[in-house]
Amino acid sequence: MRFHRNQLLIYAVTDRAWTKGRSLSEQVEETLKGGATMVQFREKSLGQGNYDRMLDEALELRKLTERYQVPLIIDDDIELALACGADGLHVGQDDMDAGLARKLLGPDRILGVTAKTVEQAKRACAQGADYLGSGAVFGTTTKADARPMTMETLRSICDCSDVPVVAIGGINLGNIGLLEGSHVAGAAIVSGIFAAQDICLATARLKEAMIKIRDKNSSYFQKTVDI
């Protein structure tokens, strides 16, 4: 699948902590119905020895995302990404080297890289990243060691980067408007989507808000690459 910055608009990141008796695929389908533009399968809780289960779930999500024509990204597991036929991989600064990830993925799959500083952003771009994930912009409960990122740092990363940037970390309907002027291409959201009572409706409202932010930033994007 060819990558486009608009696919980052509402980037739903899975978290098993919010399933509440439902399957992950049921929740993912709800966010896809609401208009999610990208899905990341992030599985930190199963641990080692559960690869077969993870592959089964990844394959199930792959079928869903193909039906909705939305990219599926696997977090920090190149083997799983290739095995399930995912559209791409996301790696953090402490995960697989981005240059190696690009080599193993090949040129046609999407590579996302976490960048928390301008230096990390520039290095990731040089190593072949298609997009950057930056945060935590509003703090987060999903990563205990995540430090809040200032809007100034976020904007600096966006402005120095050759590829689009998606903001992540504690983003919800109450604060997504604060991303205006940051020059991000989208928002990666975990609990703001999957902890919602109505996942479909929450996704739709978040997307509406992010479209307004993107449209206000349109003059900036036109100076860099076409949107």
Image (cartoon, grey):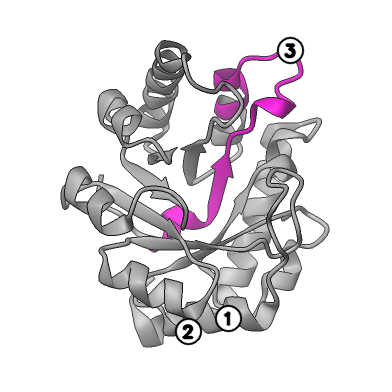
Give the amino acid type for the residue marked by disc 1 in the picture.
Arg
**Which picture quadrant has residue 137?**
bottom right
Q: Horizontally, is 130 left or right of 26 in the view?
A: left
Name the element at disc 2. Answer: helix
Element type at mark 1: helix
Tell me residue 107's x, y (percent).
Answer: 16, 52
Mark 2 to mark 3 CA distance (whole Å): 42 Å
- Which label belongs to residue 21? 3
**Kind of residue at disc 2:** Asp
Residue 182 seen anywhere in this rendered image of the structure: no
Please tell me whether residue 61 is drawn above or below residue 206 in the rendered image. above
Give percent across and percent down for residue 161: 40, 78
For the residue carrying disc 2, how many other residues have a C-alpha within 10 Å: few (<14), some (14-19), or many (20+)? some
Residue annotated with mark 1: 155
Q: Position of residue 179 (x, y in %)?
A: 68, 71
| Residue position for label 2 | 159
Q: Which amino acid type is marked by label 3?
A: Gly
Q: Which residues are magenta?
A: 5-28
Q: Is residue 98 left or right of residue 93?
A: left
Q: Nearer the viewer, residue 38 or 106?
A: 106
Residue lying at 72% horizontally and 27% vertically, measured from the top left: 17
Q: Is residue 20 above or below residue 130?
A: above
Residue at the spot 32% in from the left edge and 70% down from the top edge: 125
Task: For label 3, count other residues whose C-alpha is less than 10 Å away and answer few (under 14), some (14-19) or many (20+).
Answer: few
Residue 84 falls in image quadrant? top left
Kindly check if marks 1 and 2 are in contact, taking CB atoms under 8 A apart as contact.
yes
For marks 3 and 1, give the CA distance.
Answer: 39 Å
Assess whether mark 1 and mark 3 are in contact (beta carbons under 8 angstroms): no
Label 2 or label 3, whichever comes before in sequence order = 3
**Residue 71 pos. (x, y %):** 38, 41
Question: Residue at 42% of width from left, 17% of height from top?
Answer: 51
Query: With respect to residue 121, does 18 lie above or below?
Result: above
